[in-house]
């Protein structure tokens, strides 16, 4: 997508307008909500891959369930016995009981407060670590692209709006 904008003003005025637009975009609640939803989609898709023994795009793979656990559950699917954790990570979930999704003034918080989810995420003495999402520094390029896309679009809209004003 390419935009051409004609703006009559000095270079300093254009720079100031772009700076105002970027600052305005960072507080755009609708744009931040879209960014949060993109993060949810990335986390949820990676979660689903790992529940069936796959490796997500960040290279995370969960240790399989112990044989005794598989016999007791009658399933080898990981962390979806009651679906509450899955529902808490699912974008647009119909009953997001434990879902954390907060749009802040200048950011968004996405996660889960499902009891014991943090123990799975961190692991323990007798519990293998099953990270629900990768550390940000380990996110692959395609995840960042998906999350940055609504942010970039929001900034472009804000710049076009700001430059449409007279200097």
Image (cartoon, rainbow, N blue to C red):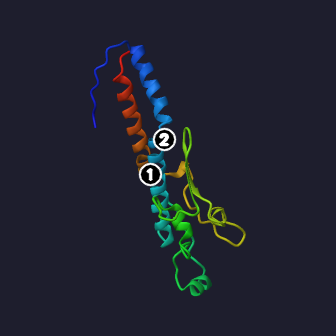
Q: Position of residue 8 (x, y in %)?
A: 31, 14
For mark 2, what is the residue? Answer: 29
Q: Position of residue 62 (x, y in %)?
A: 55, 68
Dot 1 or dot 2, earlier in sequence:
2
- The image shows residue 14, relative to residue 77, as above or below, that is above
Few, some or many residues within 10 Å of mark 2 (<14, 14–19, 20+): some
Which quadrant would the C terminus be assigned to in this image? Answer: top left
Real-space CA distance between mark 1 and mark 2, rounded to the nearest whole angstrom? 21 Å
Name the residue at 64% across, 69% down.
128
Q: Position of residue 146 (x, y in %)?
A: 41, 49
Name the residue at 48% across, 73% down.
52
Few, some or many residues within 10 Å of mark 1 (<14, 14–19, 20+): some
As drawn, the residue found furthest toward the right would be: 125
Dividing the picture into quadrants, the one containing residue 148 is top left
As drawn, the residue found furthest toward the top would be: 10
Examine the rendering and report whether any part of residue 140 can be seen.
no
Examine the rendering and report whether any part of residue 86 can be seen.
yes
In the picture, measured across the screen, residue 62 lies left or right of residue 2, that is right
Quick one: SS at disc 1?
Answer: helix
For mark 1, what is the residue? Answer: 143
Q: Position of residue 108 (x, y in %)?
A: 54, 46
In the picture, measured across the screen, residue 6 lies left or right of residue 150, that is left
User: Along the line of sight, which residue is nearer the eye, 60 or 34?
Assistant: 34
- The image shows residue 95, relative to residue 155, as above or below, that is below
Q: How many marks?
A: 2
Q: Are discs 1 and 2 less than 8 Å apart at CB? A: no
User: Along the line of sight, which residue is nearer the eye, 117 or 69?
Assistant: 117
């Amino acid at each position: 997508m390419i935009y051409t904008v004609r703006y009559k003003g000095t270079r300093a005025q254009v720079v100031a307008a772009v700076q105002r637009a970027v600052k305005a975009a960072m507080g755009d609640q609708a744009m931040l909500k879209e960014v949060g939803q993109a993060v949810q989609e990335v986390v949820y898709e990676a979660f689903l891959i790992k529940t069936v023994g796959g490796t997500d795009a960040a290279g995370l793979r969960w240790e399989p369930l112990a044989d005794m656990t598989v016999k007791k559950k009658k399933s080898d699917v990981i962390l979806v016995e009651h679906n509450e954790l899955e529902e808490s990570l699912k974008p647009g979930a119909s009953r997001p009981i434990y879902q954390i999704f907060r749009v802040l003034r200048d950011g968004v918080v996405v996660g889960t407060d499902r009891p014991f989810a943090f123990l799975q995420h961190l692991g323990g003495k007798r519990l293998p670590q099953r990270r629900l999402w990768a550390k940000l520094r380990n996110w692959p390029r395609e995840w960042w692209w998906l999350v940055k896309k609504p942010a970039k679009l929001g900034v472009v809209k804000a710049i076009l709006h700001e430059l449409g004003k007279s200097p």
